[in-house]
Amino acid sequence: VQLQACGGGLVQAGGSLRLSCAVSGGAFSSYAMGWFRQAPGKEREVVAGVNWSGLRTHYSDSVKDRFTIYRDNAKNTVYLQMDSLKPEDTADYYCAATLGGIYMITLGTGSMDYWGKGTQVTVSS
């Protein structure tokens, strides 16, 4: 299973970005999908997760009401819409997949089965 994330970049505080993660080589609709991030000098942390159908989502408190995770099973792609970005959102963002359901995403990085490479997001003040 391969995961390819893209959409990162440089944006001013208050701006928006949309990250995409395309999945190949597996049964995409079987996976719960998550977005994680890692800032310099910090541990990787969960940002958001979505279950296989897209009907259940999970967000960290730091991004709730600003970020939206959703998926398109026909395109084997999961998205992260990031609005009202803050400098503290600056990090490398990673998508990941798990067969264990959305609950596994809430447990953190060790519970994911597959990872993509990161895409860098920089928010300037």
Image (cartoon, rainbow, N blue to C red):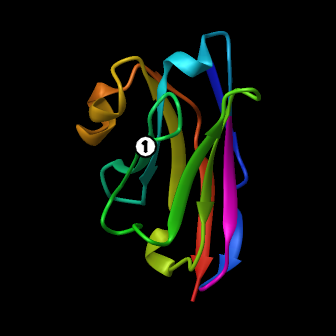
| Quadrant showing the N terminus | top right
Using the image, determine if residue 42 lies above or below residue 123.
Answer: above
The residue most toward the front is: 55
The residue most toward the right is: 75
Q: Foreground residue, 97 or 121? A: 97
Which amino acid lies under the numbered mark 1 shown in the image of this protein? Answer: Gly
Q: Foreground residue, 29 or 7? A: 29
Using the image, determine if residue 8 lies above or below residue 35.
Answer: below
- Residue at image position (61%, 10%) is 26
Q: Residues within 10 Å of mark 1 (few under 14, many from 20)?
A: many
Residue at the spot of label 1? 49
- Residue at image position (69%, 45%) is 20
Judged by its main secondary structure, the magenta piece is strand
Q: Which residues are magenta?
A: 14-21
Q: Where is residue 41, by image quadrant?
A: bottom left
**Magenta-colored stretch includes residue 3:** no
Left or right: 58 as drawn, with respect to 66: left
- Residue at image position (59%, 46%) is 70
- Residue at image position (71%, 63%) is 9
Left or right: 59 as drawn, with respect to 14: left
The reply to whether residue 120 is in sight is: yes
